[in-house]
């Protein structure tokens, strides 16, 4: 990792991060202008496929027209399904609706589902592609920073149910990811900061040099400086791709490292209703800070590292404490119960990603719920 | 293949057919009494897992009590979900219902979904297991001849939609298949004959010796003679396992051979509403006979072989002609349109499994719909 961002290629070509999964390798292209080039990139790779675009109303207003034009220019047949924006779209009802639309359009196995949007659209459309005709190809065009650095890579797809988030889904790898960094200019600063939390997470998992680079350059990243942004997105995608290649189906453990901050974070999201009160990246930021302070309290991690993590997230405009969540939260026992309904549970013990220091995270499979309850008490000043 | 059935092992142990898929190998056990031994077999392989049994009301009346007792005796926690019998249970609504039940029972990734029933239950429960927490283990306990020789092996799971059969699903291999041949005594003779059609199919695909053995012994098989039955089920499972190992995801073609008779057959089932008017194995029998006569008309197959196929299916009490279907059928063009909405379609050409003779089936990817229409005209005597 260098101390300054790598420049974009001088010819304006996107950065390319390969994901070398055996039998289903794919590329992530990163840079400005990829929506307008999507038709050409897809036609060059997959030929004369027919496309179903899945998007939401908010994203469609900015990007559906240019995307459809690029498909038309490339001679690709295309139709779209436009859904309401928001987490409630990741439901069985939406799944059935989109599946029916894809079948009504008579798409075949080799045709494409294209997800144009953030994580909700990518997770839902990817799951549709996973199950229609037992597996169609799909392409991710993520339009949020969060989805560009996280959910669009790695093949986790799914929906929520009333019993929890992402409890239903499939592993289904995309055939291509087009991360158009120019789309991020339509995001609110709050959503840019939230996506930034996942970038910082990659440094904290196993890349202390990336974390140090972010400490020096986070303003350029969240300010959407093109070179800094492409560098940070590419570093994140490379980090995620490494883990995914090692443990595609999250069976051997390595992939669980990506959940740093997520066990706490998902509990907070469930408690706050997955809405504007606390958005995903903010929950992850608090979760990461908690994971480091929990590690420090357990004597695993130097308290200075936990403080450095919180200071950086705070400097980037992110929340780091339970008290940063607006409004009331459930009591400690109720929060721990929410963690226990998370899917990363084995035989009553909780799985957490803990850390021995910055860039030294590890999987702890046998965390006692009582220790978590005690830690939450400390956090709340009791 | 011998001219007489292999005897059951003298100690009463079941026949074992391994399915050696890399990373997810499993065994098929075949013989009488396996429902009563299910708890012990599962506990020996998977330890103290918790089990959700998925079954239907008709099967539950015969087999749910003994199965639950065997789980209790083995110390396995278990709950059941009992659904209405019939093809309409393979729906999005049932999928959501069973998924919710499995989540309500707080099953974890390593726990088991057990499918107790025929193909509808196996396909639905397997799909539930495929998508809950992005993949749980599942065990098939098929209780029909059709599911013992076909759907319980190979990992195809799914549901129907108003737009067609099996258009939504996943490839998800079972961890164990327990084919209790004693459960078949509760089937009607009609359903035994229907299952027999799939057994004959395996001989016709690539095993002329099996077909010859069936010509001599079909009465013992459909009469449920224990040794003949176990021999025929095991031969079928071995044949299917060979193809599945070669082409797990039906991408390289080999697996498509299993669809011998199914493109015609599915069109007839769609036309007749997937009900008692024409059950699946009967549709397959007609489809197989049609595939051989179509092959003969195209000059690919000796007419004597097509006649021998039809004669054997007729001797086994199965239908072999469109005119054997009670009531009216759609016209030829409408039947071909139904085939074209089947998922085995590429770029407007139909895929059929055709044959150069008995045991010499092959995949034809570019069958002209007009040739099929012309053949159907011949079949109807025009």
Image (cartoon, coloured by chain):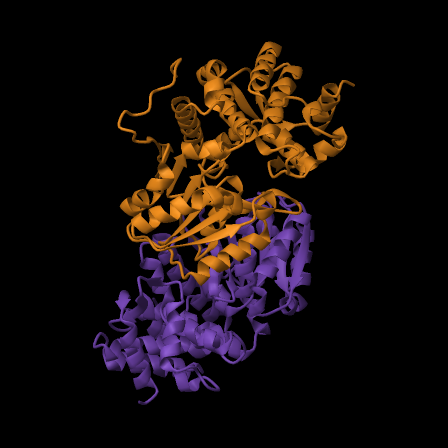
Chain colours: A orange, B purple
Residue furthest left in the image:
B299
Q: Is residue B258 left or right of residue B81?
A: left
Point 47% across, 70% down: residue: B229
The picture places residue B310, in percent across and down from the top left corner, at 35, 81
The picture places residue A370, in percent across and down from the top left corner, at 73, 27
Please say whether residue B4 is visible from this viewpoint: no
Quadrant of the snapshot with the N terminus of chain A = top left
The picture places residue B30, in percent across and down from the top left corner, at 50, 61
Q: Nearer the viewer, residue B268 or B3?
A: B268
Q: Quarter of the image holding residue B306? A: bottom left
Please say whether residue A239 is visible from this viewpoint: yes
Q: Nearer the viewer, residue A333 or B236?
A: A333
Residue furthest bottom in the image:
B381
Q: Nearer the viewer, residue A274 or B185?
A: A274
| Number of dots carrying numbers | 0
Q: Nearer the viewer, residue B53 or A325?
A: A325
Point 62% across, 36% down: residue: A346
Q: Is residue B28 left or right of residue B344?
A: right
**Vertically, is B19 above or below A216?**
below
**Vertically, is B379 above or below A163?**
below
The picture places residue A111, in percent across and down from the top left corner, at 36, 54
**Vertically, is B240 above or below A348?**
below
Quadrant of the snapshot with the C terminus of chain A = top right
Point 54% across, 76% down: residue: B275
Q: Quarter of the image holding residue B300? A: bottom left
């Amino acid at each position: 990792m260098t101390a300054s961002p790598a420049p974009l290629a001088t010819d304006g070509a996107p950065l390319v991060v390969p994901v070398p999964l055996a039998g289903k390798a794919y590329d992530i292209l990163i840079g400005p202008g990829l929506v307008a080039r999507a038709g050409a990139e897809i036609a060059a790779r997959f030929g004369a496929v027919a496309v179903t675009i899945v998007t939401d109303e908010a994203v469609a207003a900015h990007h559906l027209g240019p995307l459809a034009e690029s498909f038309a220019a490339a001679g690709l047949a295309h139709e779209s399904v436009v859904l309401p924006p928001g987490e409630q779209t990741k439901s069985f009802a939406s799944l059935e609706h989109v599946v029916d639309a894809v079948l009504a359009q008579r798409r075949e196995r080799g045709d494409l589902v294209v997800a144009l949007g953030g994580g909700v659209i990518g997770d839902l459309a990817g799951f549709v592609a996973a199950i229609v005709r037992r597996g169609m190809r799909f392409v991710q065009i993520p339009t949020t920073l969060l989805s560009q650095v996280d959910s669009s890579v790695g093949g986790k797809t799914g929906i929520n149910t009333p019993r929890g988030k992402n409890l239903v889904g499939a592993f289904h790898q995309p055939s291509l990811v087009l991360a158009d960094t120019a789309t991020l200019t339509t995001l609110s600063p709050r959503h840019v900061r939230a996506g930034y939390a996942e970038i910082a997470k990659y440094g904290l998992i196993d890349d202390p040099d990336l974390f140090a680079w972010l400490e020096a350059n986070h303003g350029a990243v969240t300010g959407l400086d093109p070179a800094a942004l492409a560098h940070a997105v590419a570093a994140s995608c490379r980090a995620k791709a490494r883990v995914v290649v090692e443990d595609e189906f999250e069976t051997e453990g390595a992939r669980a490292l990506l959940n740093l901050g997520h066990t706490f974070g998902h509990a907070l999201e469930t408690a706050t209703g997955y809405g504007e009160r606390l958005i995903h990246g903010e929950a992850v930021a608090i979760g990461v800070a908690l994971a480091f302070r929990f590690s420090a309290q357990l004597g695993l991690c130097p308290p200075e590292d936990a403080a450095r993590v919180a200071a950086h997230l705070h400097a980037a405009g992110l929340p780091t404490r339970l008290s940063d969540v607006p409004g009331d939260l459930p009591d400690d026992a109720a929060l721990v119960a929410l963690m226990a309904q998370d899917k990363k549970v084995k035989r009553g013990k909780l799985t957490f990603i803990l850390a021995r220091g910055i860039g030294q995270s590890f999987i702890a499979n046998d965390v006692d719920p009582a220790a978590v309850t005690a830690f939450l008490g400390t956090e709340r000043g009791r």
